Structures are given as C-alpha cells and as structure tokens.
Image (cartoon, grey):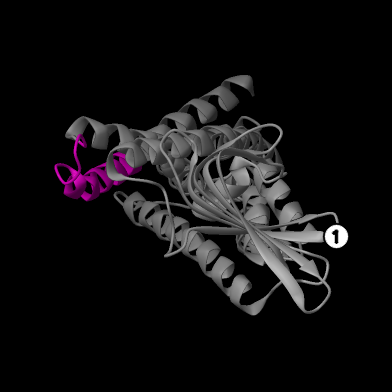
C-alpha cells in the first residue's frame, strides 16, 4: 500500500503543481498588462518596478487558486487512473473505497496546511510590500475620498481618528484626531501633517491642536497650539489602520480577529470583517472538499478521449466554488447573515455534493 500511496501522491502533486503554474502564469500576464499603464506616468516607476509589484502579488493569487487547482489536478489524476485501468489494478491490490478516501484526505490535509500558511503568513507580508513599492513611486496608499476612519474609547472619552494615507516608509500622512468628552462634545482636535507608529502611541509631526475649555453652559474658550512633535497615546496599531485602507482579505487571521475586537469594543459594526475572518478559517479546509470530490472520477469508465470532458467539468466546478464563495460573502454582508454560516455555506454545499457523489458512484455502484 505504501507504493500505491506514493504513486497517488506523486502524480497528484505534480498535476496540481502544473495546473497551479499555468493559472499563475495567466494571472501574472494579466497583472503585468494592467501595471504597464502606470509605467512612465510617475517619476521613477519603470518596468522593473512593475515586475516586482506583480511578483509580490503571486502569493495572493496562489492562496485564491489553490482549492481550484487542487480540484482540477486531482480530478485529472483520478480520471487518468480510471482511463488506463490503473485504478482497477489498485482496487484488486486492496485499495478499497474507504482506504482510497483516507489516502486522499491525507493529501488534502497537506494542501490545507499549505493554503493556511500562504494565506496567513506569506500573502499578507508580500501584499503589504507590494503596496509600499507602488506607493513609493506612484504616491501614498489611500482609499476613498477621506482615507481611513477609526474609533477608540479612552476612559470616559471617545476618539475619532482619520488617517488620509499611508506612506511608503510605513508612516501616516494627514492625520486628524477628534476627542469627545463624556457628554459627546468635542474636547479637542489634533491635525498633523504626518505621523509614525510607536509602542507608546503615535508620534505626530507638524501638529496643530485646538483645545476647548468650557466653564458652565455659557462660557467657553478655544486654546490653539502648534507643536513640531506630539506623542498621542493610543492602542490603534498599524495593522488596524492598514485594515481600513487595504482589503481585509489580505490580512492575517489573528490581525483580523484583533481588529474585530477593536471594532466591537468601540461600538462599531464588524459584520464585513467577521465574514472575512470566518472565510479565512474555512477557506483552507475547502482543499479537503476538493480531493473528496475528485475521488468518484476514479470509479468512472472512460472511453478513448473522454477524459477531457471530465477535466473541463472539474474546471467549471472549481470556478463555481470560487464564485459561490464571493456571492455568499456579499449577500451575507447585505442581509446581515450569521458570519460563520455565511463563510461556511459554500464548503458545506460542496461537501454534501462530494459525499453524495462518493456514496452513489463508489459505495452504491
């Protein structure tokens, strides 16, 4: 049985690697064509910088593609085994349905670990580097018309923070801070040209402060201060600011969890980020679903040349899973569905389809 397992693993790994390289080459080509429009528009942004930006985006594409390529690669291998009658020989050698399922599940667990490592460690780091590379030559990282807005409670006071952009060196540009007292009135405002993240708070530069002093309901005065530097104590980290400026699917799972805790503790809605958090949890497990879905193809009887149609069906199934995953994410956010159920629904649907196909084609027939 060790020889059979090594054969299945070797063939599956080589097929998945080949399919993954093909899809990555296609995505890299499209990304490069899209990046060429920026070459020459900004001072210093050359083809080499565009190539570096595209290369740093490969781990993100790999994370998105792995469940699809695992499905296509394993379907191709199982169908080829069936077409060449190799799987029939394996069955006569003692490879029963449940043993074959366990063999593929072990293979799927390997892909689960790989998908989790790429999505939680490699892709967030390279995506952040890619954004900083692009910001260095094309400008600052920003989103929308006003940048990122965050909220924090400090004792009995609340604070609203606006960060217009992130610089290529990791600092902040055009920072505005509004501090409110316990009655909801503005206690002070801070406007800074730039800022840096620190362990004790934000180190702001070019600061203009307005402090409101109130004595009773009728008497009030405004004290205006200008300072070259000002240390503002806060627990808002660089990852939280980046989460508001960048896409949440590019964050690590632990960073998403901490950001959700921050939003909830400050009375802000976190539905979008909760859905993305659970998608990050369940998405690697979809590789297990895909390898189970490929097993029934080994029990089909192929005619000469019939394998291409089944591989095409695998491609369509993989694309439909990707589309269904996105549709459930948007629908769950709009309809306020349970975050974990929204993220798990595509995997549950495909798991039922996989087990149904396994039971009908393998056990029943």
Question: Residue 201, how many percent across, how many down?
Answer: 68, 38
Q: Can you name the residue that lies furthest to the left here?
A: 40
Q: Which residues are magenta?
A: 22-45
Q: Quadrant of residue 178?
A: bottom right
In the picture of the structure, the residue carrying the numbered disc 1 is 156
| Image coords of residue 318 (percent x, y) | 46, 56
Is 25 in the magenta? yes
Quadrant the N terminus occupies? top right
Q: Residue 247: x percent and y percent?
A: 50, 53
Relative depth, front residue between 125 and 346: 125
Q: Nearer the viewer, residue 130 or 215?
A: 215
Quarter of the picture containing the C terminus is: bottom right
Task: Say if 16 sits above or below 210 in the image.
Answer: above
Left or right of 5 in this view: 270: right
Residue 345 visible here: no
Q: Work out whether residue 73 or residue 156 is closer to the camera in this orientation and state it.
A: 156
Based on the displayed image, in which of its 4 quarters is residue 24 positioned? top left
**Taking 259 as reference, is 125 above or below it?**
above
- Please name the predominant secondary structure of the magenta segment in the image: helix
Label 1 neighbourhood size at 10 Å, few (<14), some (14-19), many (20+)? few
Residue at image coords 77%, 68%: 214
At x 76%, y 53%, the residue is: 261
Classify residue 260 as left or right of residue 157.
Answer: left
- Residue 26 falls left or right of residue 333: left
């Amino acid at each position: 049985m060790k020889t059979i397992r090594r054969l299945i693993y070797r063939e599956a790994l080589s097929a998945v690697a080949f399919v993954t390289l093909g899809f990555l080459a296609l995505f890299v080509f499209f990304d490069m064509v899209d990046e060429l429009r920026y070459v020459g528009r900004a001072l210093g942004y050359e083809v080499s910088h565009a190539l570096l930006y595209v290369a740093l985006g490969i781990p993100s594409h790999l994370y998105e593609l792995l469940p699809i390529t695992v499905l296509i690669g394993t379907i191709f291998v199982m169908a080829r085994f069936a077409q060449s009658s190799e799987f029939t020989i394996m069955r006569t050698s003692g490879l029963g349905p449940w043993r074959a399922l366990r063999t593929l599940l072990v293979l799927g667990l390997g892909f689960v670990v790989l998908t989790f490592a790429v999505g939680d460690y490699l892709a967030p780091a390279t995506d952040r580097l890619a954004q900083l590379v692009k910001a260095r030559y094309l400008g600052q990282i920003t989103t929308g018309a006003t940048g990122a807005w965050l909220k924090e409670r400090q004792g009995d006071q609340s604070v609203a923070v606006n960060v217009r952009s992130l610089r290529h060196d990791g600092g902040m540009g055009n920072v505005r801070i509004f501090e409110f007292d316990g009655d909801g009135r503005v206690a002070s405002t801070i406007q800074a040209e730039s800022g840096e993240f620190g362990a004790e708070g934000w180190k702001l530069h070019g600061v203009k402060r307005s402090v409101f002093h109130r004595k009773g309901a009728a008497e009030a005065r405004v004290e205006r201060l200008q300072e070259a530097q000002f240390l503002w104590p806060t627990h808002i980290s660089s990852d939280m600011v980046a989460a508001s400026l960048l896409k949440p699917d590019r964050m690590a799972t632990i960073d998403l969890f901490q950001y959700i805790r921050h939003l909830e503790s400050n009375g802000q809605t976190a539905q979008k980020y909760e859905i993305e958090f659970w998608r990050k949890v369940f998405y690697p497990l979809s590789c297990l679903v895909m390898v189970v879905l490929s097993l029934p193809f080994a029990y089909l009887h192929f005619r000469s040349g019939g394998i291409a149609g089944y591989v095409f069906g695998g491609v369509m199934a993989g694309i439909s899973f990707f589309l269904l995953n996105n549709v459930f994410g948007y629908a769950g956010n709009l309809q306020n569905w349970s975050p974990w159920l929204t993220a798990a629904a595509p995997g549950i649907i495909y798991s039922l389809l996989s087990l149904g196909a396994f039971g009908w084609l393998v056990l029943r027939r």
